[in-house]
Image (cartoon, helix red, strand yellow):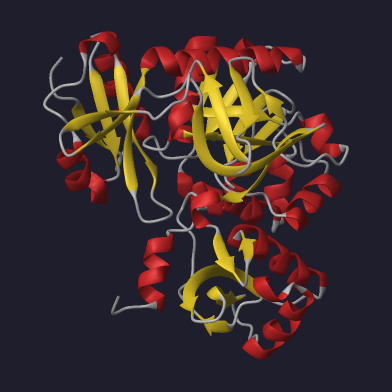
């Protein structure tokens, strides 16, 4: 097989999808990336991918902790994931072929690619949404889907923007199901959506698993259940003894990654892959607790910064403090080992003294209290709702 064709996802997504599908029909592989990642992807790609995979795609994975991996997904694995999602929908009483799939996510992201794969496998209609429309709910309403006949995938930041305006709420009310993934769904945001009656389905997956391997049915979400639900039909989940790391076995697991012109197989133990997420498996299914590679050891305690972020955000919302964004990073401490440092951005047009936040944090255990609060006016997540932690580490320590 020849070197994968590189497609830059910077224009018409429908045209890019047509070129992708043409290559797949020819049994070829395609690498997808944003323009700014072109050089990194070219450096990673081998001269050819192994013939046994046939049609395949190479997608970026990770990057939140500083590393960027280029994941190989054979088309057959994408089809397995799409088939499992169809069976899951049928169990909910939805007929996949009769649904419209609305896609506002970029094609080079697995959650923007899978609506294309699902639509083709199910014989469903695919609707491409201009990402800019997600910031203009009034225009979205001009071409709203039939009530109860459409699916949508969002990240939490997109969901937050939409429910902040009445037109966005009215648009979301029309969907039979709204998958929310890519980042943790804040508790206060979930409660607002329940009060609005929005049919959310919080889900969990990754590029390595071809998107979802677990999802919570909307009825369970509206009834107050938290987490990401039970595994989909093609996947099994378990926890590693001792660490609580989530391990996944699925028909959609990637065979591996490309780096520096070579292929690197996915690390597995007898068909099980460790996701790097610490999790809990309970009666309602999967709950993600945070990244194990982001955990710190502070004063003899293991601290998951993502959990602390969510707790602090909830405390701020309970007190109506105008905190728009919060990111916790670690820095060395001679006594504690590591301590958290908080970067924060107030809501637009508001002031929020660091002293108030420091006082609020006293409700947390000492190991979880940030020792410093730093105003960061430019603090923001990526367009997909994730933290580019290496970027903000560089902001915190520009000389490191």
Q: Where residue 226 sits: x, y (%)?
A: 78, 42
Q: Nearer the viewer, residue 284 or 56?
A: 284
Q: Nearer the viewer, residue 247 or 186?
A: 247
Q: Where residue 36 sits: x, y (%)?
A: 25, 51
Up-down: is 339 above or below 170?
A: below
Instruction: Locate the N terminus by quadrant.
Output: top left
Residue depicted at 46% across the width and 42% down the height? 130
Residue depicted at 72% across the width and 64% down the height? 311
214 left or right of 62 in image: right
Where on the picture, by quarter, is residue 97?
top right
Residue 202 seen by the camera: yes
Q: Nearer the viewer, residue 105 or 66?
A: 66
319 left or right of 146 in image: right
Q: Where residue 282 sits: x, y (%)?
A: 78, 34
Residue depicted at 15% across the width and 22% down the height? 48
Residue at the farthest right position: 223
Q: Nearer the viewer, residue 96 or 304?
A: 304
Where on the picture, by quarter, is residue 71?
top left
Where on the picture, by quarter, is residue 394?
bottom left
Instruction: Locate the C terminus by quadrant.
Output: bottom left
Q: How many marks?
A: 0
Up-down: is 325 above or below 350?
A: above
Residue 142 seen by the camera: no
Up-down: is 350 above or below 2?
A: below
7 left or right of 17 in image: left
Q: Where residue 334 sits: x, y (%)?
A: 49, 81
């Amino acid at each position: 097989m020849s070197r994968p064709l590189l497609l830059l996802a910077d224009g018409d997504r429908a045209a890019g999808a047509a070129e992708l599908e043409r290559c797949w029909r020819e049994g070829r592989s395609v690498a997808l990336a944003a323009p700014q990642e072109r050089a990194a992807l070219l450096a990673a790609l081998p001269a050819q991918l192994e013939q046994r995979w046939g049609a395949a795609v190479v997608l970026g994975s990770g990057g939140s902790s500083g590393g960027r991996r280029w994941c190989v997904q054979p088309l057959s694995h994408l089809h397995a994931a799409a088939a499992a999602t169809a069976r899951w929908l049928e169990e909910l009483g939805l007929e996949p072929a009769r649904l419209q799939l609305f896609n506002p996510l970029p094609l080079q992201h697995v959650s923007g690619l899978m609506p294309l794969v699902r639509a083709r496998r199910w014989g469903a209609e695919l609707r491409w949404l201009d990402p800019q429309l997600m910031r203009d709910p009034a225009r979205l309403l001009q071409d709203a889907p039939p009530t109860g006949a459409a699916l949508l995938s969002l990240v939490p930041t997109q969901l937050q923007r939409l429910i902040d305006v009445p037109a966005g709420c009215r648009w979301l009310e029309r969907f039979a199901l709204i998958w929310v993934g890519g980042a943790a769904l804040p508790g206060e945001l979930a409660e607002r959506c329940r009060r609005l009656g929005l049919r959310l389905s919080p889900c969990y997956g990754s590029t390595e698993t071809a998107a979802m391997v677990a999802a919570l049915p909307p009825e369970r979400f509206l009834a107050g259940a938290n987490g990401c639900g039970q595994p989909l039909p093609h996947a099994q989940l378990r926890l590693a003894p001792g660490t609580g790391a989530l391990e996944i076995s699925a028909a959609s697991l990637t065979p591996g990654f490309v780096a520096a012109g070579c292929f690197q197989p996915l690390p597995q133990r007898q068909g099980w892959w460790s996701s790097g997420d610490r999790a809990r498996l309970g009666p309602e299914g999967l709950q993600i607790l945070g990244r194990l590679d982001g955990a710190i050891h502070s004063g003899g305690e293991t601290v998951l910064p993502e959990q602390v972020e969510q707790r602090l955000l909830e405390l701020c919302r309970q007190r109506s403090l105008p905190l728009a964004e919060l990111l916790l990073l670690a820095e060395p401490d001679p006594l504690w080992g590591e301590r958290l440092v908080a970067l924060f951005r107030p809501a637009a047009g508001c002031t929020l003294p660091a002293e108030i936040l420091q006082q609020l944090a006293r409700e947390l255990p000492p190991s979880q209290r940030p020792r410093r609060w730093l105003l960061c006016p430019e603090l923001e997540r990526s367009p997909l709702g994730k933290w580019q932690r290496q970027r903000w580490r560089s902001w915190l320590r520009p000389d490191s």
